Image: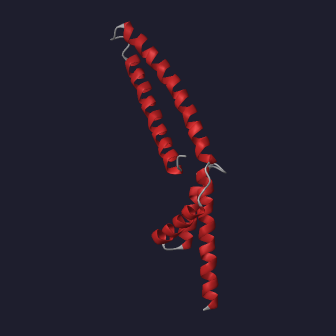
């Protein structure tokens, strides 16, 4: 079974593929802008290219949906969330900054998606660490 990292990288590559298809469509538009200077067969070729790119775009989007579905079926490893929370604390040094960053991450993902659940888990770990530190301060 693939990992979240593998699926996420695949989604990033999917985005690159979509951008490439947009470049192909831009190329067709450029060719069409010179229709008076080019042989009509160039326009015919452009029409075929546009149809192929649009069809490919639909297939790439469908593939993205399947990858998203596979990613969202994965369970989030609580240890990964704990590690991420500790790393955030090392990087930002304050709970407020960590909580702000984590809240922004949560908001950027669809509810119940893998990454939404991951960042929600990180938030829970941060809150647990904060509660533990407050308990330790009280016992001092």
Quadrant of residue 39 within the rendered picture: top left
From the top left corner, tell me how far across and down residue 58 is, in percent: 55, 27
Tell me if residue 9 can be seen.
Answer: yes
Quadrant of residue 59 within the rendered picture: top right
From the top left corner, tell me how far across and down residue 7 is, in percent: 52, 45
Tell me if residue 109 can be seen.
Answer: no
Q: Is residue 74 left or right of residue 12?
A: right
Residue drawn at the location 61% of the way across and 65% of the way down? 123
Residue drawn at the location 44% of the way across and 25% of the way down? 25
As drawn, 134 above or below 92: below
As drawn, 62 above or below 72: above
From the top left corner, tell me how far across and down residue 54 is, in percent: 51, 23
Quadrant of residue 106 within the rendered picture: bottom right
Q: How many marks?
A: 0
Q: Is residue 32 left or right of residue 69?
A: left
As drawn, 24 above or below 136: above
Residue 70 vs residue 46, the one in the foreground: 70
Q: Residue furthest left?
A: 37
Residue drawn at the location 58% of the way across and 32% of the way down? 62
Q: Residue furthest top?
A: 40
Residue drawn at the location 58% of the way across and 66% of the way down? 99
Q: Quadrant of the C terminus?
A: bottom right
Residue 74 vs residue 59, the one in the foreground: 74
């Amino acid at each position: 079974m693939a990992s979240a990292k593998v699926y996420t990288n695949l989604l990033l590559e999917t985005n690159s593929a979509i951008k490439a298809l947009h470049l192909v469509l831009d190329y067709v538009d450029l060719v069409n802008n010179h229709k008076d200077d080019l042989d009509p067969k160039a326009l015919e070729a452009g029409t075929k290219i546009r149809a192929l790119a649009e069809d490919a775009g639909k297939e790439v989007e469908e593939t993205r949906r399947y990858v998203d579905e596979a990613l969202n079926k994965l369970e989030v490893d609580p240890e990964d969330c704990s590690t991420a929370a500790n790393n955030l604390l090392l990087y930002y040094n304050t709970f407020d900054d960590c909580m702000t960053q984590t809240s922004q991450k949560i908001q950027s993902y669809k509810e119940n998606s893998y990454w939404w659940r991951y960042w929600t888990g990180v938030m829970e770990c941060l809150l647990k660490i904060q509660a533990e530190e407050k308990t330790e301060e009280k016992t001092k």
